[in-house]
Image (spheres, helix red, strand yellow):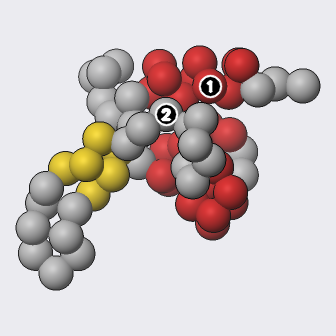
Amino acid sequence: MTDKLWSMDNIAEYLGVGKDLVRKRLICKGNFPKAIVLPTGGSRGSHRRWVPAEVKKWVLKHRG
């Protein structure tokens, strides 16, 4: 399925970096695409997911 939402793991894999870098240095930036928050309940609260096309567009905009 091509319209699957991405997790932080998916973003890290796409960029070829570690999940910690994605969590601590990328998704916290104000200009990074906003996450979709899935209310899954339970002890972990919710899960954040991103639209792949938005992440890819952001990457292309910031390539140097």
Are discs 1 and 2 less than 8 Å apart at CB?
yes
Relative to 47, say whether 5 is above or below. above
Q: Is residue 7 left or right of residue 30?
A: left
Q: Amino acid at mark 1?
A: Trp
| Residue occupied by mark 2 | 33
Q: Is residue 14 left or right of residue 62?
A: left
Q: Which mark is residue 24?
A: none
**Quarter of the rendering occupied by the C terminus:** top right
Residue drawn 12% across the image and 60% down it = 40
Q: Count the numbered circles shown.
A: 2
x and y percent of residue 12 in the render?
60, 49
Q: Residue at the right extreme?
A: 64
Give the mark nearest the N terminus, 1 or 2: 2
**Quarter of the rendering occupied by the N terminus:** top left
| Residue occupied by mark 1 | 58
Q: Is residue 39 left or right of residue 10?
A: left
Secondary structure state at the residue bearing disc 1:
helix
Residue drawn 23% across the image and 75% down it = 44
Residue 16's quadrant in the figure? top right
x and y percent of residue 47 in the render?
27, 57
Residue 30's quadrant in the figure? top right
Mark 2: few, some, or many residues within 10 Å (few <14, many ≥20)?
some
Q: Residue at the left extreme?
A: 41
Relative to 32, say whether 45 is above or below. below
As measured in the structure, the alpha-carbon distance from the residue carrying label 1 to the one carrying label 2 is 7 Å
Residue drawn 56% across the image and 37% down it = 32
Secondary structure state at the residue bearing disc 2:
loop
